[in-house]
Amino acid sequence: MPIATDFEYHKPKDLSEATGLLSRYQGRAQLLAGGTDLIVWLKEGMKTPEAVIDIKGIPELWHLDVKNDTLSIGARVTFTELIESGLVKERFPALWEASRTVASCGVRNRATLVGNLCSAVPSLDGAPALLVYDACVHTRGPVEERKIPLSEWFTGPKRTALLPDELVTAVELPLPKKKSAGCYVKLGRYRGEDLAQVGLAVLAEEGNLWKLAFCAVGPIAKRAEKIEALLKSKKLSEALIAKAKTLVVKEISPITDIRASSEYRLHMAQVMLERGLKTAAARLAGKGPAYGVSVL
């Protein structure tokens, strides 16, 4: 299917030029990085921008490094680059595991983590792991820079806190201060390229501290704070897991669509919670399945 929409094409060389263009078009432009969402939207007429601003030539947006005990992932970093990073696999294994579930190899070679966050679809695989690692989104506009906690980033399905004249420069994750282990559990209809019917990230930290986040079972990806509060400082047991599963219905609001019924999503979210908790606990103890091995 060809792209039928006419638009101006710009390829800025630096951030100042990019934000200047965004300011000029005031919400009537679309940014192009990986393009795995944007090209589809243009072909299907879902987006009809006056301009497309290609940010692939901006060197400041490509970096994947640690400074001041913080991992910074630039806006041009792809999921494949996250998967190939030994640093990500060692320090943020739940993010590494989640990255491996995104679409297909070909898509991961182009799709960026930041683009995934900016698309803000409810089923985005990148968000749950970033939420449990307390990630922040860094944006830049013509006048100021902002640092937005990921917990405040999503404002609705396909909506974010990004302003019309801003672009995301990076996502930052503080290095875990305690020994931790994680797990990303994804339910799809089949093996291969598919959107999540349910996604769940679990992070276990020393001292019986837990962080959990769901996607695809509500308008936005978000932390499961009621379950986290229940589990806090308690040793994991079958009885505690059973009680945690009863809270799932209070944490998510799944819908029925072409991929799954709401009832099936709720049931599987409970199954995934149990398996995710047990897997993260086992990995924290130096046991359990290797990262990348599905627990469904």
Image (spheres, rainbow, N blue to C red):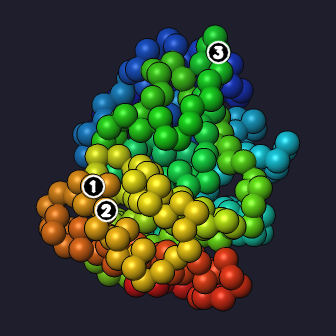
Residue at the image point whose x is 65% and y is 51% from the top: 77
* Frontmost residue, 162 versus 57: 162
Badge 3 amino acid: Glu
Compared across the picture, whether 225 is left or right of 90 comes to left
Tell me which numbered mark, 3 or 2, is placed earlier along the sequence: 3
Taking the image as shown, residue 249 lies to the left or right of residue 243, namely left
Between disc 1 and disc 3, the foreground one is 1
Q: Give the residue number, with chain letter if any, for mark 3.
A: 144
Q: Is residue 39 above or below residue 231?
A: above
Up-down relation of residue 89 to residue 29 (above or below): below
Front-most of residues 215 and 38: 215
Q: Position of residue 165 (x, y in %)?
A: 51, 18
Do tag 1 and tag 2 residues touch (Cβ < 8 Å)? yes
Q: Position of residue 10 (x, y in %)?
A: 55, 27
Q: Which residue is tagged 1? A: 250
State the SS at label 3. loop
Q: The disc labelled 2 sits on which kind of residue?
A: Leu
SS class of the residue under badge 1? helix
Instruction: Identify the residue at horizontal 82%, vertical 47% (top origin).
Output: 69
Kindly indicate the quadrant of the structure image that contains residue 267.
Answer: bottom left
Which residue corresponds to the image point at 70% horizontal and 35% vertical from the top-left? 58
In the rendered structure, the answer to whether residue 68 lies left or right of residue 231 reads right
Return the x and y of residue 291 as percentages of the image width and height.
Answer: 61, 80
Q: Nearer the viewer, residue 138 or 204?
A: 204
- Label 2: which residue? 247
Give residue 80's mark: none
Q: Is residue 221 visible?
A: yes
Crowding around mark 2 (Cα neighbors within 10 Å: few <14, some 14 to 19, many 20+) is some
The one of 89 and 24 positioned closer to us in this rendering: 89
Mark 1 vs mark 2, CA separation in Å? 5 Å
Identify which amino acid the numbered label 1 is placed on.
Lys
